[in-house]
């Protein structure tokens, strides 16, 4: 059959495959956006890990990642062709990788060693819940893939507004960077939430494992690379 002579279920705008005829001799193009998305994630892990450790800290880096994720997701919905779409998928993969890294590090650095492993697992419950919720979001937009991208660009934006007043910077990172006063203020806030009070003569000491954050980022990168390889092989 000649190109454009078939009829797609749901219309030509239901999927990127249908809209840009990514079948037959063009079907190899359909894999490019996904591949670039994961390549972008790998580069993003290295970028955000360094940014969170050396310059901005965990909270500001997470804030930046949320804004970029929302922006690139929204812009993806306006892609005029497969090549622009692929480029934006790369940018989106790069942007969103900072969310996982910073959330994991930030959540584990604000608790003691006893709870660190447990807290690190909680984030993956929401990760799973997000995937399970996707069909319910996608079904109303099943005839227009662009609407789906616009809808899923909203959660990172909402999270950004919640992040500013509700999330504090990691006291471990503040202490390692020599910002003892800010670290003490964060600890006092945590103590207040738990109905406790810090001693007046408390002295903050740099943790013996000051590079915990960097180590977690390294482990996360290794996991992501392995995950990408498994996805590509399937």
Image: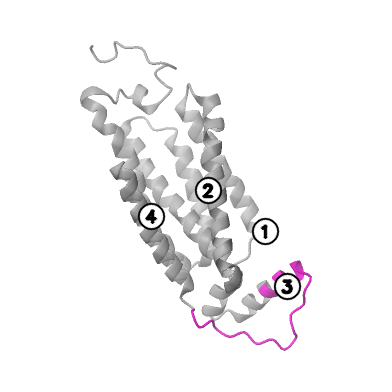
Say which residue label 1 marks. 166
Looking at the rendered structure, the secondary structure element under dot 4 is: helix
Label 2 vs label 3: CA separation?
Answer: 29 Å
- Comparing 67 with 176, the one in front is 176
Say which residue label 4 marks. 224
Looking at the rendered structure, the secondary structure element under dot 1 is: helix
Range drawn in magenta? 187-209
Residue 127 circle label? 2
Looking at the rendered structure, the secondary structure element under dot 2 is: helix
Which of discs 1 and 3 lies nearer the camera? The answer is: 3
Say which residue label 3 marks. 191
Identify the residue shown where x is 32% and y is 32%: 82
Label 1 vs label 4: CA separation?
Answer: 28 Å
Estimate the x, y position of residue 77 in percent, counting from the top left: 45, 33
Label 1 vs label 3: CA separation?
Answer: 15 Å
> Decide: marks 1, 3 in contact (CB < 8 A)?
no
Identify the residue shown where x is 48% and y is 49%: 68
Q: Quadrant of residue 63?
A: bottom right
Label 4 crowd (10 A; few <14 / some 14-19 / many >=20): some
In the image, is 101 to the left or to the right of 2? right
Q: Specify which label sits upstream in the sequence, 2 or 3.
A: 2
């Amino acid at each position: 059959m000649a190109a454009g002579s078939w009829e797609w279920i749901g219309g030509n705008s239901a999927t990127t495959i249908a809209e840009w005829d990514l079948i037959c001799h063009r079907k190899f193009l359909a894999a490019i956006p996904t591949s670039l998305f994961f390549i972008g994630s790998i580069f993003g892990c290295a970028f955000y890990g360094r940014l969170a450790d050396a310059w901005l800290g965990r909270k500001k880096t997470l804030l930046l990642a949320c804004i970029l994720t929302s922006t690139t997701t929204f812009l993806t919905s306006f892609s005029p062709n497969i090549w622009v779409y692929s480029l934006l998928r790369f940018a989106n993969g790069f942007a969103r990788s900072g969310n996982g890294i910073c959330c994991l590090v930030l959540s584990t650095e604000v608790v003691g060693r006893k709870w660190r492993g447990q807290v690190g697992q909680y984030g993956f419950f929401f990760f799973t819940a997000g995937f399970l919720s996707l069909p319910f979001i996608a079904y109303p937009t099943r005839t227009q893939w662009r609407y789906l991208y616009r809808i899923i660009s909203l959660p990172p934006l909402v999270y950004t507004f919640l992040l500013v007043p509700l999330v504090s910077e990691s006291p471990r990172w503040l202490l390692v960077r020599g910002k003892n006063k800010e670290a003490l203020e964060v600890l006092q806030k945590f103590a207040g939430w738990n109905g406790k009070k810090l001693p007046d003569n408390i002295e903050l000491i740099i943790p013996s494992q000051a590079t915990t954050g960097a180590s977690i980022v390294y482990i996360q990168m290794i996991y992501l690379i392995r995950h990408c390889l498994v996805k590509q092989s399937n």
